[in-house]
Image (cartoon, helix red, strand yellow):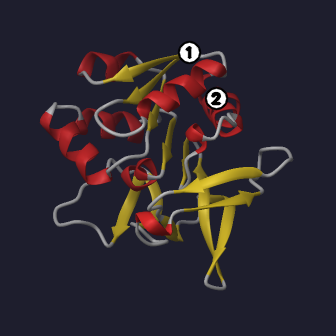
Amino acid sequence: MLVGVLALQGDFREHISALAECGVEAIPVKRLAEVEAIDALVLPGGESTTIAKLARTFGLFDRISERIHAGLPTYGSCAGMILLADRIEDAAAGQESFGGLDITVRRNAFGRQVDSFESDLNMSGITAPAIRAVFIRAPWVESLGPSVEVLASVEFNGELHPVAVRQGNLLATSFHPEITGDNRVHRYFIESVCQAVIS
């Protein structure tokens, strides 16, 4: 299995390292030929608007969206969650997403960079101990469709907000597991999400 990590902007190198530690071949995706070659895709954290604009500039946007909607196993973290969402609250003017995931996501839901925080989360499908989740200008899921499963939520100002969701072959987290050295979310993506589609 060949996993691509969209490498136009953001922390794609960390995702490639995490996937390699999980024993799979991972490559940076910057060209159309690489979009066609991969069996699964990771959309990294970064600036969701910038990533989408660069995907347009390099002629990748439509094909990535087509492949996601056609069933390509895809995992998005932070900005990647926004890029997978069908609907975006507080979107920048003209902001686009690849879509496919039946959620409404709120950008910068927890606040600005200075409001970044860490939290221990229990995530369905991943065994104890809890995951140390790092939230950096993170989104949360505002609403979701009936086929979307909530895997983890975090409490903020007295309310629970979904921060990890799955819809079939699509997985998204508000947080950044690629920067903690804990690769269990990546293993879940490879062993549960991808294998369910590829096998």
The kind of secondary structure element at disc 1 is loop
Q: Say how many tags the image has.
A: 2
Q: Which residue is more in the foreground, 151 or 196?
A: 151
Q: Residue at x 45, y 67 (%)?
A: 114
Q: Position of residue 116 (x, y in %)?
A: 51, 63
Q: Position of residue 63 (x, y in %)?
A: 27, 33
- Check contact, mark 1 vs mark 2: CB within 8 A: yes
99 over 145 or under it: above or below: above
Please tell me how crowded label 1 is: few (under 14), some (14-19), or many (20+) other residues with Cα within 10 Å: few
Residue where numbered disc 1 is placed: 1
The kind of secondary structure element at disc 2 is helix
Judged left or right of residue 178, residue 12 is left
Amino acid type at circle 2 is Ile
Picture quadrant where residue 134 is located = bottom right
Q: Position of residue 109 (x, y in %)?
A: 45, 71
Amino acid type at circle 1 is Met
197 over 1 or under it: above or below: below
